[in-house]
Every structure is written in structure tokens, then in C-alpha cells.
Image: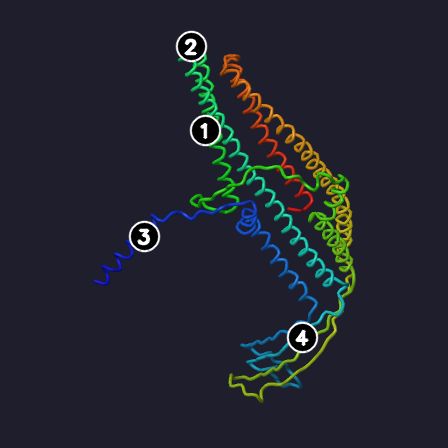
């Protein structure tokens, strides 16, 4: 009986899960930015790279610290070495030897190799942090453009729906006029053709809107089964950067861009690598201490009396003399690497200037286009109102009405396109300034 109840419980649970409505999420731009920085694998990879570089710093720092190790060994002599002394055969050692102890080492001077390696690891960690910041900015730019792309695709779909509705209304009006003799069959046919031409454009706009949402969902790491509601619309919000001087924006970008910080760290690494190459030509001095117990027996019945203590310290000096000119080659490579960072800096600065300039003037152009298209829409709407009045009074033709409707639809599409271009340019400019 209990088993039957359990089976019934599972059936009810599964049935309830099937018919439960999917969770609906209201998606805003800020929510999308938050999700992309949480779910996107690129940000996760960049974060793991920072953690790995932290571990490498600890590893490099360990080279500056003393090392202490324990050791133990056992040696079995199957044939003991025998020497002849004054005609007598004397065995050297025992069949079994056991050794255990501790070994301490501390580098005293290695030409700065360990210290330079430690500083290189710190600069490498700073580079990964800057790379994480650059990845964040790139993802924020991508998700902002994708989100605005959804708004643009939906606005185009809305314009096409308005066009279809206007064409349907026009067709209805023409049919009424034909019934009263004010329009001909040709006018009706022309209105029907206009409506038919709008239908595939509406279908295409709907498909584009669906694809834009799918692209945004994949970028956010959301599944296709998750439902989102986006109630925002493309708008024009004046930017504080619009009134700023172009050279001021370039200076802001050069001070804030993570690529500049990365190049600075790369220059430090190049200098340290040159120091490392020079350190290979310098002597090294290492201090070591060994403390051990050693025991020997012919059998394996060791006792504490069989072990004897030994304690010693040493200084090991190594002086490089000749290695086939390999050190000189490493020094030359390090010098070339240092020169390369200077050329990279020049190229990077020029690239950032071009990026800021392109985004800035594209934004300014889009601002002017938004203002212009807004006026065009107002004029086209007034023109449509007037031509409809004239058409109703018989003072205009159906062709004039259709031409004005087409012009209005085109103006609306152009306005939405300029809004999208403005917001895209503004996002690009903010990314260039590291302000997303």
C-alpha cells in the first residue's frame, strides 16, 4: 500500500511540474549587464586567470624563502668492498646502511634572479587583472549592443505593424469609396498590392526580432525555455561626452584604458627579463646545512646505539665562465623585447586615439540625425493627416495617400535606425573611455 502511495505521489509531482508555468523574468539593461558578468564563460576564464596568477606570485615568492626538507635512505650491499691493509683483508662498511636527517638551504646571492622573477610574477598578475577589466568592458559593450539590438528589432517590427494597420485602413477606405463611386477597381487593387507588399516585411521584422532575442539569451547564458519580458524602448538620452572636447576624451581614455596599464606592466617585465639575462653572468652563493643520523649493521636488527649523528654546514659558490655565448644572446633578446614595448606603446596610443575619434564623431553625427529624423516624422504625420482629409473630400488621389504613407513609414524606420546608431556609438565611446 505504501508503495502504491509513493508511485501516485511521483505521478502527481511530475504532472504538476509539466503544467507549471515557466518562470518569467523582467529583463532590463542593468539586469542583462549583471547576468553577462555572472554567466558568460569568458568572464569566468578571465577570473580564473587572475587566480592562477595569484598562485604564481606565491610560487615565485617561495624562491626567496629558505627550504627545509627531510630525507631518508636505505642501502643494501650485496658485496662489501674489501681492502688489503698490512696483509689483512678488511671490509669497508656493513651490509645494511640507513640514513635519516634534515637538509636546510638558503640562497644568499644569485645575481637578483629570484627577486626579478618574483617581480615579474607580480607584473604578470597585474596584467591578468587588467585583462579581466578589458574582458568586462568588452562583454558589457557586447551585451549593451545586443540589448539595444533587441529594442531596435522590436521597434522595426512595431513600425511594420503600423504600416500594415495603415494599409488595411486605407484598403477599407478605398473599398468604401468604390461603393460610392469615388474610387475605381484599380484603386482597390493598388491598395491591396500595397498591403501585400508590407506582409513579408512584417514577417521578416518578426524573425529578426526573434533572432535578436535568441542572440541576447545566448550571450547571457540563459536557456531557450526561459521567458523574458523586455519593456524598454530605444530612446535618445543626451550624453555628457557630447559637449566635451575631443582631446579631453582622448586623455581620459589614455588614463583609464586597461590596455595602457597592461603595456606598462609588460615594460616592467621586459626590464626585469633584461636583469635576469644579466644575472645569468653573475656568480651565485648558496648556504646549506645538513643534520643526519646514520646507522650500519650486517644484520637488520638496528637499535638506537647503531646510529651516529653528523651535522655540517656549507657555502656553495658557482661562477659562470663560458656557456657558448648563450648568456649574451639572452641579453640581446631582452634588449630587443624592451625596445618592442616602446613601439607597441606608440601603436596602442594611435589605435586608442582613432577609436575615440571614430566613436565620438559617429555619436555626434547620430545626434544630429536623431534630431532631423524626429522633425521629419512630425512633418510626415502632418502631411498624412492633411492628405487623408483632402482624399476624404475628393481633393486628392489614393496614390498621393499611399506615397505619403510610404514616406511616413520610411521616416519612422530611419528614426529608429538613427536611435540605434546613436546608442551604439555612445556605447562604443564609453567602452573606449573604459566607462561601461
Above or below residue 404? Residue 347 is below
Distance Cα–Cα, label 2 vs label 1: 34 Å
Q: Earlier in the sequence, mark 2 or mark 4?
A: 4
In this picture, residue 110 sits left or right of residue 367 = right
Nearer to us of marks 4 and 1 is 1
Q: Quadrant of residue 287?
A: bottom right
Disc 3, disc 1: CB below 8 Å? no
In the orientation shown, which residue stands out farthest toward the bottom?
305
Local secondary structure at mark 1: helix
Disc 4, disc 1: CB below 8 Å? no
Q: Earlier in the sequence, mark 3 or mark 4?
A: 3
Q: In the rendering, at what x and y percent does residue 315 appear?
A: 74, 73
Tell me the number on the disc at residue 104.
4
Residue beneath the point at 46% across and 17% down: 191
Disc 3, disc 2: CB below 8 Å? no
Q: Quadrant of residue 376?
A: top right
Label 3: which residue? 14
Of the pair 121 and 274, the residue shown nearer to us: 121
Residue beneath the point at 59% across and 83% down: 295
Amino acid at each position: 500500500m505504501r508503495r502504491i502511495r509513493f508511485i501516485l505521489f511521483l505521478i502527481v509531482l511530475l504532472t504538476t511540474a509539466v503544467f507549471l508555468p515557466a518562470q518569467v523574468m523582467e529583463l532590463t539593461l542593468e539586469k542583462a549587464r549583471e547576468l553577462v558578468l555572472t554567466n558568460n564563460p569568458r568572464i569566468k576564464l578571465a577570473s580564473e586567470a587572475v587566480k592562477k596568477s595569484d598562485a604564481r606570485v606565491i610560487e615565485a615568492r617561495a624562491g626567496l624563502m629558505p627550504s627545509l626538507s627531510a630525507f631518508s635512505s636505505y642501502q643494501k650491499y650485496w658485496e662489501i668492498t674489501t681492502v688489503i691493509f698490512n696483509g689483512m683483508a678488511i671490509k669497508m662498511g656493513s651490509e645494511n646502511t640507513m640514513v635519516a636527517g634534515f637538509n636546510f638551504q638558503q640562497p644568499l646571492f644569485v645575481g637578483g634572479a629570484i627577486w626579478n622573477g618574483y617581480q615579474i610574477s607580480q607584473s604578470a598578475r597585474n596584467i591578468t587583472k587588467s585583462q579581466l577589466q578589458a574582458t568586462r568592458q568588452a562583454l558589457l559593450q557586447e551585451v549593451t549592443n545586443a540589448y539595444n539590438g533587441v529594442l531596435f528589432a522590436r521597434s522595426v517590427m512595431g513600425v511594420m505593424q503600423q504600416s500594415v494597420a495603415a494599409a488595411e485602413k486605407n484598403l477599407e477606405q478605398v473599398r468604401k469609396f468604390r461603393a460610392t463611386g469615388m474610387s475605381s477597381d484599380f484603386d482597390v487593387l493598388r491598395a491591396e498590392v500595397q498591403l501585400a507588399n508590407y506582409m513579408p516585411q512584417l514577417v521578416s521584422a518578426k524573425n529578426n526580432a526573434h533572432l535578436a532575442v535568441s542572440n541576447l539569451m545566448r550571450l547571457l547564458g540563459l536557456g531557450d525555455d526561459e521567458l523574458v519580458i523586455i519593456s524598454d524602448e530605444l530612446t535618445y538620452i543626451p550624453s555628457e561626452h557630447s559637449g566635451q572636447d575631443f582631446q579631453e576624451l582622448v586623455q581620459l581614455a589614455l588614463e583609464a584604458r586597461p590596455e595602457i596599464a597592461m603595456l606598462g606592466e609588460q615594460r616592467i617585465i621586459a626590464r626585469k627579463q633584461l636583469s635576469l639575462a644579466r644575472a645569468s653572468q653573475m656568480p651565485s652563493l648558496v648556504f646549506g646545512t645538513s643534520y643526519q643520523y646514520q646507522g650500519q649493521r650486517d644484520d637488520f636488527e638496528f637499535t638506537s646505539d647503531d646510529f651516529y649523528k653528523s651535522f655540517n654546514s656549507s657555502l656553495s659558490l658557482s661562477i659562470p665562465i663560458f656557456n657558448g655565448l648563450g648568456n649574451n644572446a639572452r641579453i640581446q633578446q631582452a634588449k630587443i623585447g624592451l625596445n618592442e614595448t616602446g613601439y607597441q606603446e606608440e601603436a596602442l596610443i594611435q589605435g586608442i586615439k582613432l577609436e575615440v575619434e571614430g566613436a565620438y564623431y559617429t555619436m555626434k553625427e547620430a545626434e544630429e540625425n536623431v534630431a532631423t529624423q524626429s522633425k521629419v516624422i512630425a512633418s510626415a504625420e502632418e502631411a498624412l493627416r492633411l492628405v487623408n482629409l483632402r482624399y476624404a473630400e475628393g481633393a486628392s488621389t489614393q496614390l498621393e495617400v499611399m506615397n505619403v504613407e510610404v514616406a511616413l513609414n520610411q521616416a519612422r524606420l530611419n528614426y529608429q535606425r538613427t536611435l540605434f546608431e546613436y546608442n551604439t556609438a555612445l556605447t562604443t565611446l564609453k567602452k573606449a573611455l573604459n566607462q561601461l
